[in-house]
Amino acid sequence: AQKITQTQPGMFVQEKEAVTLDCTYDTSDQSYGLFWYKQPSSGEMIFLIYQGSYDEQNATEGRYSLNFQKARKSANLVISASQLGDSAMYFCAMSPIKAAGNKLTFGGGTRVLVKP
Amino acid sequence: NAGVTQTPKFQVLKTGQSMTLQCAQDMNHEYMSWYRQDPGMGLRLIHYSVGAGITDQGEVPNGYNVSRSTTEDFPLRLLSAAPSQTSVYFCASSFPGALNTEAFFGQGTRLTVV
């Protein structure tokens, strides 16, 4: 069984500042993938970034980076230079590597509000 | 490309009615799954499929049936709707074998059971 915990229900961040969203996980799988998705108020799920458990380097995608600490079982998302359009719900998720993005387990989410 | 298409976008059902939520993808993805999202919560896996003819249960399968007769389609059937099934339903698909494998989500179906 897999479990994702996001302990920050909501956060305010000033525009142009960086923000870190916490995510811890638990799994019995040896190999797994970690994902972050963004859900704006319009409701769609937008893929942001992926980290494989076998990756030694932290993943980066533009202004998004994933701070992966395997021993601590954490996969925090860092958004640099926040923009007003970053206001949304953010979900951390994981799946077994073989599931390849299928069979996702999601955390409860963190709502981010970017202030001008 | 249309990606993952869900129909309908909105639906109101009476308790006890049955219906099918449609999901179709045009990316030739073998993997597909259904999730539900209750207010203020994350998504929970209902059923998933790893290919045509192969389905399995997720975390919250009770009250739902699925089948996968083609690679493209993965319908979700509500057998006898209950108010507890009021939720937003998402269908997703992904391609096995890629290292950086994201799931592509449909726009969601907002279902209200009265």
Image: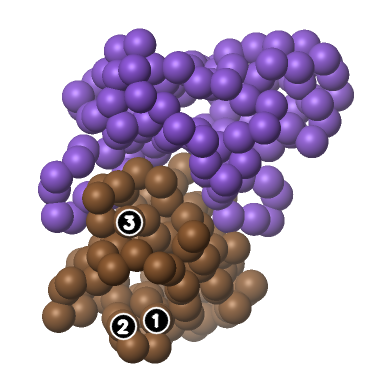
Q: Chain of mark 1?
A: A
Classify residue B52 as left or right of residue A103.
left
Q: Position of residue A115 (x, y in %)?
A: 54, 76
Residue under the image location 66 percent in, 19 percent down = B78
Q: Secondary structure at mark 1?
A: loop
Residue under the image location 35 percent in, 11 percent down = B69
The amino acid type of the residue labelled 2 equals Lys
Q: Position of residue B87 (x, y in %)?
A: 68, 37
The amino acid type of the residue labelled 3 equals Pro
Q: Which chain is brown?
A: A
Spatial CA distance of label 3 from label 1 is 15 Å
* Dot 3 and dot 2 within a common chain: yes
Q: Chain B is which colour?
A: purple
Q: Looking at the picture, does residue B59 appear above or below residue A97?
A: above
The amino acid type of the residue labelled 1 equals Lys
Classify residue B33 as left or right of residue B65.
left
Which label is found at residue A70? Answer: 2
Q: Quadrant of residue A19?
A: bottom left
Name the residue carrying label 3. A96
Q: Secondary structure at mark 3?
A: strand
Residue under the image location 77 percent in, 11 percent down = B17
Spatial CA distance of label 3 from label 2 is 15 Å
Classify residue B110 as left or right of residue A16.
right
Name the residue carrying label 1. A73
Q: Are marks 1 and 2 in contact (CB under 8 Å)?
A: yes
